[in-house]
Amino acid sequence: MQIFPKTLNILPVVLALVTFVAGGAVTGIVWYYLSPANLQVGYTPRQPLPYSHRMHAGQLGMDCRYCHANVERSGEALIPPTQSCMGCHSMIKAQSPRLRLVRESWATGKPIEWVRVHKLPDHAYFNHSVHLNGGVGCSTCHGRIDQMEVVSVAQPMSMSWCIECHRNPGPSLRPHDQLTNMAWVQTATPEAVQALAANVHPPENCSGCHR
């Protein structure tokens, strides 16, 4: 006596198909929504005191290197010391309530605890000076800082994002006198772009960034 109908013979196939489709959907959702582009881009930490990059770098036109000194010679971008702030604010808005922490830091010698915005994992090696000397401008990785009231992450800074540039660096390169020009756009011909990249050979192997 047959208890189950013959149509149940296709049940394992249906279950396997549903599992495959559901697994693929879950993998796709996790792959996309848990990627650096969604988890990192837009990160805007609260800083210990209000500082407007839009005003300083944008309206006043201050060069990035005034505060982030030595980026062309150092592996890391310097977080500005209080001395850099007081270079101007010992005379400009010297008694502003918004600058109370700056004055206290200057008087006590205790540094302001700025919150780092762009962070790379410890297993990733990155050298600021190499990229700047190679012709990569500030806005390429950090976005239009001159338009940000509070700095946020503009690019995912993921391995795939970095390696994409390493494989084809030409479009990301610019003349050295335009490195800190936030409004600079690439207008060169494809031949000129390739000429810029002729002497730049970024590593594409694992040991280039994981040392």
Image: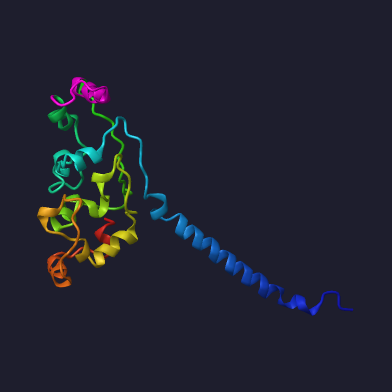
**Viewer-closest of 3 and 172:** 172
Residue 27 is inside the magenta segment = no
The residue positioned 35% from the left and 42% from the top of the image is 44
What span is in magenta?
A: 91-107
Q: How many marks?
A: 0
In-front residue for pair 151/112:
151
Q: Nearer the viewer, residue 117 or 149?
A: 149
On screen, residue 130 versus residue 5, left or right, reads left
Q: Quadrant of residue 1?
A: bottom right
Residue occupying image coordinates x 29% and y 64%: 164
Where residue 19 sits, quadrant-wise, is bottom right
Residue 35 appears left or right of 187: right
Which residue sits furthest left?
Answer: 177
Q: Is residue 64 visible?
A: yes
Judging depth in this view, the residue of 6 and 103 nearest the camera is 103
Asked if residue 206 can be seen in this view, the reply is no
Q: Where, by quadrant of the figure, is residue 152 drawn?
A: top left
Residue 134 in the image: x percent, y percent?
Answer: 15, 58
* Applied colour scheme: rainbow
| Magenta span main SS | helix
Q: Position of residue 111 (x, y in %)?
A: 23, 28
In the picture as drawn, the residue positioned furthest to the front comes out as: 59
Rendered residue at 17%/65% (across/down):
201
Q: Is residue 181 above or below residue 172?
A: above
Q: Is residue 102 magenta?
A: yes
The C terminus appears in which quarter of the rendering? bottom left
Image x and y of residue 194, in percent: 16, 70
